[in-house]
Amino acid sequence: MSVDQARPSSNGSAVGNARPTAALTAAKSSRPRSRRAGRWWTPWLFLAPALILFVYFKFIPMANAITMSFQEVQPYLGNKWVGTDNYRTVLTDDGFREAAWHTVVLAVGQTAGCLVLGLALALLMEGQSKRLGFIRSAAFLPVVVPIAVVAELWRIMYHPTADGMINSVLGLFGSSPSGFINDPHSSMASIMVTGIWRGAPYDMMIFLAGLGSVDRGLYEAAKVDGASRFQRVRHVTVPGLRSVFSILFVLAAIRGLRVFTEVFLLTNGGPDGSTEVVMTLIYKLGLEQNRLGVGAAGAVLLFLATLVLTVCVHLFRRRGNE
């Protein structure tokens, strides 16, 4: 038999041996995939406890609040369907419009103050030194302190007499004592300062994380071109933190729109309604005046305003990226 006659038989046997091997390999590789595909529910099993808590304590109460906003809530007597009357009452009430304006002013002031102060602190504390780690922890302390403790601390410092803590410091510079939270003209600014003091360290930590992604070569190039420190921050640092700014803006704005605890503990909306915000007004309508339907309508409107703000910032961010 010649070599040419034997060659096809050898090739045929090789191909024949390769086919079962490939089939076995495919079968073995498909078994783990089928097993993993059959266990798609495993992650959901681990998430189930948290999801149950979220549904029971968050989503079901939200659905009930939306339903209550269209009803006149009468405990033990049965709720009465009133349609959009609660929303009409809220939107036409002068007190609610004034509280909404106070909320917007407080949210804008706290958002701007937290972003500016947080960026300044991040720039001052950027680095790898061990001492900076201790200083960062100390600066972050207001965030982890309970808000009730923070409010009580600032209420003591805002004592309106001349021997109050802050008034004593101001007296060293010849300033007369201020009423702070007891004065309608300065109460809103005083609460704003408290919110900035507590929220700026949180923004600082996120800015510190974002500064690590800024290209250091751009700083060197700007320095070679003769740019000052302020110019490097303006033209290199701020553009490099654009995505961080958008995220922090949304978080700070939501935090400002939903402000309640510090206002409730410091002034409870006073004096003379100068610090009344939407959340404190909803609390008073629902739990003090027993107008739960009107309070639920105000809460739904606040949720919609927060949702619209978040969506607008997201769309603006996507358009900027394009």
Image: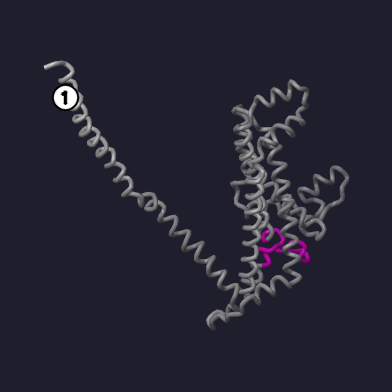
Tally the marks: 1
Displayed quadrant of residue 155: bottom right
The outermost residue toward the bottom is 77
State the residue in front, 293 or 270.
293
Estimate the x, y position of residue 192 in percent, counting from the top left.
Answer: 73, 52
Give the labeled residue for mark 1.
Answer: 9
Displayed quadrant of residue 95: bottom right
State the residue in front, 301 or 13.
13
Q: Look at the image and say whether residue 279 sits in the magenta stretch.
A: yes
The answer to whether residue 286 is left or right of residue 3 is right
Which quadrant is the C terminus positioned in?
A: top right
Colouring mode (rainbow / by chain / secondary structure / one colour): one colour
Looking at the image, which residue is at 44% across and 57% down?
51
Estimate the x, y position of residue 107 in percent, counting from the top left.
Answer: 71, 54
Give the residue type at disc 1: Ser
State the residue in front, 250 or 314.
314
The local secondary structure at tag 1 comes to helix
Looking at the image, which residue is at 39% across and 49% down?
43
18 up-or-down from 164: above or below? above
Estimate the x, y position of residue 82 in percent, counting from the top left.
Answer: 61, 79
Task: Specify the segment rendered in magenta.
Answer: 264-281
Estimate the x, y position of residue 128 in percent, counting from the top left.
Answer: 60, 27
18 up-or-down from 3: above or below? below
The answer to whether residue 126 is left or right of residue 28 is right
Which quadrant is the N terminus positioned in?
A: top left
Q: Look at the image and say whether residue 189 sits in the magenta stretch.
A: no
User: Magenta span: helix, strand or loop, mainly?
Assistant: loop
The outermost residue toward the top is 2
Dot 1: few (<14), some (14–19), or many (≥20) neighbours within 10 Å?
Answer: few
State the residue in front, 154 or 86.
86
190 up-or-down from 139: above or below? below
Looking at the image, which residue is at 71% across and 41% down?
117
